[in-house]
Image (cartoon, coloured by chain):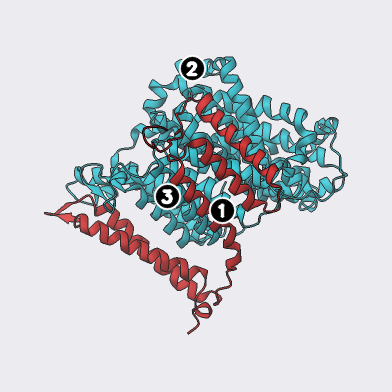
Chain colours: A cyan, B red
Amino acid sequence: MDYISGVIQGFFVLLNPVIFIHLVLGFLIGTFFGAVPGLTSCLAIALLLPITYSMDTTAALVMCMSIFMSGIYSGSITATTINIPGAPSGMMTAIEGYPLMKKGEGAKALGHAAFASMVGGAIGSILLIIFVPVAAQVSLLIKTPGKFSLIFFALVVIILAQRGKSFSKGALATLFGILIGTIGIDLMEPVARLTFGVTKLTGGVQLMPVIIGTFAISELLLQSETGDKKIAEIEDESIKIYRKDFIPTFKEIREIGVWKYLKSSLIGFFTGVLPGAGGSMAAFVSYAEAIRSSKHPEKFGGESIEGIACAEAANNGMCGGALVPMLTFGIPGDATSAIVLGVLIINGLNPGPQLLENQFHLIAPMFAALFISAIVLLPLTLYIFGPYYMKIVSINKGVLYSSIAAISMVGGYVSTYSVFQMGLTLLFGVFAYFLRKNNYPTVSFLLGYILGGMMEEFFRRALNLSHGNIMIFFTEWDSIIFLVLTVIFMYFLLFKKTPLASEEVSVSSD
Amino acid sequence: MNFKKIINGTILVSIIFFIIITVFLFEALETAPPLVNGKISPTFFPIIVLSLMYFADIVIFIKGFKEEKGFDFDLSTLKHPTWVVIVSFIYINIFKVIGFSLSTFLYAFSLIMIFNPKKGKIKAVVAALMITGTVYLLFEVIFGVRLPTVHLPKIGGIY
C-alpha cells in the first residue's frame, strides 16, 4: 500500500512547476537528439551528466526519463522523413515509413509511430511500476556468490547481444572496460593499482570522462571526418506534412489489433530487461514477430503500418524494461540506463532494495515522468512540432558539434574541477573513436567499466567467505541459477540461429 | 616488405591492444604478484582480466589473418579528426591559463572552421560567441559551476 501511495505521490511531484519544466525541457532535448542522425538520447543524458552535480536530484532524474522516452521515439522521425534513423531503434521504422513518406503518407506513418510509441511507452512504464518491487524482493535473496554470477551473466549477455560486432571484439571491449574500472586504490587494501605512478589516478578513473569521452567526443571525431554543412539532405523538399494527418483512424488501429500493440510492448519490455539488448533489438524482434504473425506479410518491406506500430511499441516499451535491472540490481539494461545509473551514483543513490525502501520519493517521480512522457508529451509534441520535424536535419553541423564539444569538455572539467579529467575525456574519446571505427562495441566497454568494480568486489568477498575455494560459485543455489542461465543464453545466442542472434542486428550505440 | 599488404585494420588494432595489455600487465606485476602468502592480492583480479584479454586479442588477431589482406584504410579521413584532437588538446592546456571565455571562444571558432572551412569568418565568430555564451549561461549562471577566469601575468606589480 505504501508503494502504491508512493507511486501516486510521484505523479503529484510532476505538478511542481520547476519539475514539470524539467520534464518538458528533457522531452524536447530528447526529441532533438533522437531525431538528429548521429545524436542519441544516450548522448543527451551523457551531456546532462555534469550538470546534474548542481541540479536537484528529482529534476535531474525526471529530465533523464523524458529524454530517454522521447529519444527512443524520435528516432522514427528522420527514419520516416529522410530514411535515416535518428536513433538505431528507428531502423525498422525506416523500412516501412520512408516508402509511405514518398507516397505522400508521411504524416500517417509518423502518427502511427507516435501512437504505438505512446502505447508501448505507457505499458512499459506500468510494467516497470509492477515489476520493480518484485525484482527488489528477488534481489534480497541473492547472496554474494550469486551477485558475482549475476554480473557475470549480465556481461556475457551484453557481449552476446552485440553479435553483429563479433563475439571476441565484444569480449575484449568489455574486459578493457572492467580493467579501466580497476585502476586506482584497491577495494579492500590501501594499495594503488595500475596508476603508472600518476597520483591523480589513485582515486580511479571517474565516470564522467569515460561516459562523455565514449559517447560525445568519439561522435564528434566521427562526424568531423565528413565536414558537410548539413546533418543530412532532404531529398524532396516539396513534401508537406499536415497536422490533421497525424491522427491515426480507429479503423487503422483496429486493423493492426489491440493484441499486436500489447504483444509488441511486452516484447519490448522483456527485451529491455535483458542486459545490453536495447531499443533496436526490441524493435527488430518485435518486427520479426509481426511479419511471422501478420495476416498481410506481403505488405511488409514497403508500406506496412503494422510494421511501424510493432517496432515502435517495442522500442518504447523497452524503456521501462531497461530500468528494472538497473534500479534493483544496479545492472543497466542498455547504454542509456547505464548513464542514468551514473546520474544516480553521482547523486549518492545506490541501486537496490534499500533505494526503493529509503529513497522511493526520488524514484517514484522517475516512473511518473516515464509514463507522462509517453502518454501526454509524445502525442502533444508531435501535434505541435510535427510539421517542422523535417527541418531538424537542416541544422549546421559545425555549429552543432562545436557546441557539443564545448559542453563535453567543460562537462569533463566540472566533475572534479580538474583539467586532468578533461584530458581523460579526450583520451577516452579518441580511444572510443578507434573502437567504433574498427567495429568494437563501445556499449560493452562502458557496461564493463560500470559493472567491473562490483564484479570484483563480489568475487573477492565470495572467495574470502570460502577461504579461497572457488567451488563456492558452484555450490550456492543462486550462483548456480545464473551460471546455468549463462550457459543457456550462450547456447541460444551463440550457437542457435534466433532473431536475437541475427548478424543483421547492430546495437552499438543504442 | 610492404606491411600494408600483409596487415589489415583488425590485425593492427589487435597489435595495439596487445601492447596495451602487456604494459598494464607489467604495471600490475610490478605492484604485487597475484597471490601473496597463498592469499589473493589487489592485482589478482586485474591479472585475470588481462589474461582473458590476451586470449580474446589472440582470437581477433588470428581472425584478422583469415580476413582479406591489405590495409585499405583511407588515411585522409583522419585529417579532420586529427585536427579536432589537436585543437581539443590545446584547449585543455589553455583552459585554466587564459580562462573559460577566451579559450572556449577560440575552441568553438577553431572547430567551426574545421567542420566548415568555407564558412565566413564573421559568421564563425558570431557562432563561436553564441556557443561560449550558451555554455557559460548553462554552467555558470543556471547551475552555479565556477569556471576559470583570466589570470593575466603580473608585470612590475601591475596587471
Which residue is at the front of the view, A298 or A280? A280
Q: Distance between the residues labelled 2 and 3?
A: 33 Å
Quarter of the picture containing the C terminus of chain B is top left
Q: Is mark 1 on a helix, strand or loop?
A: helix
Q: Which amino acid does label 3 sit on?
A: Leu
- The residue to which callout 2 is attached is A6
**Residue A219 locus on image (x, y percent):** 57, 50
Task: Say whether residue A128 is left or right of residue A423.
Answer: right
**Residue B69 locus on image (x, y percent):** 54, 77
Q: Which residue is drawn at 60% across and 63% down?
A: B77
Instruction: Choose the circle earlier in sequence order: 1 or 2.
Output: 2
Q: Is mark 3 on a helix, strand or loop?
A: helix
Mark 2 is surrounded, within 10 Å at the Cα level, by few (under 14), some (14 to 19) or many (20 or more) other residues, namely: some
Q: Residue at x 68, y 38 (%)?
A: A74
Depth check, mark 1 against mark 3: the one in front is 1
**Residue A396 locus on image (x, y percent):** 70, 44
Same chain under badges 1 and 2? The reply is yes
Q: What residue type is labelled 1?
A: Leu
- The residue to which callout 1 is attached is A221
Same chain under badges 2 and 3? The reply is yes
Q: Which residue is drawn at 41% across and 42% down?
A: A419
Q: How far apart are marks 1 and 3 (CA)?
A: 28 Å
Determine whether A309 is above or below A23 in the image.
Answer: below
Q: Is residue A404 in view?
A: yes
**Residue A203 locus on image (x, y percent):** 30, 41
Chain designation of label 2: A
Instruction: Choose the circle earlier in sequence order: 2 or 3.
Output: 2
Which residue is outermost to the front? B156
Q: Residue at x 42, y 65 (%)?
A: B16
Which residue is at the front of the view, A65 or A256? A65
Q: State the mark number for residue A155.
A: 3
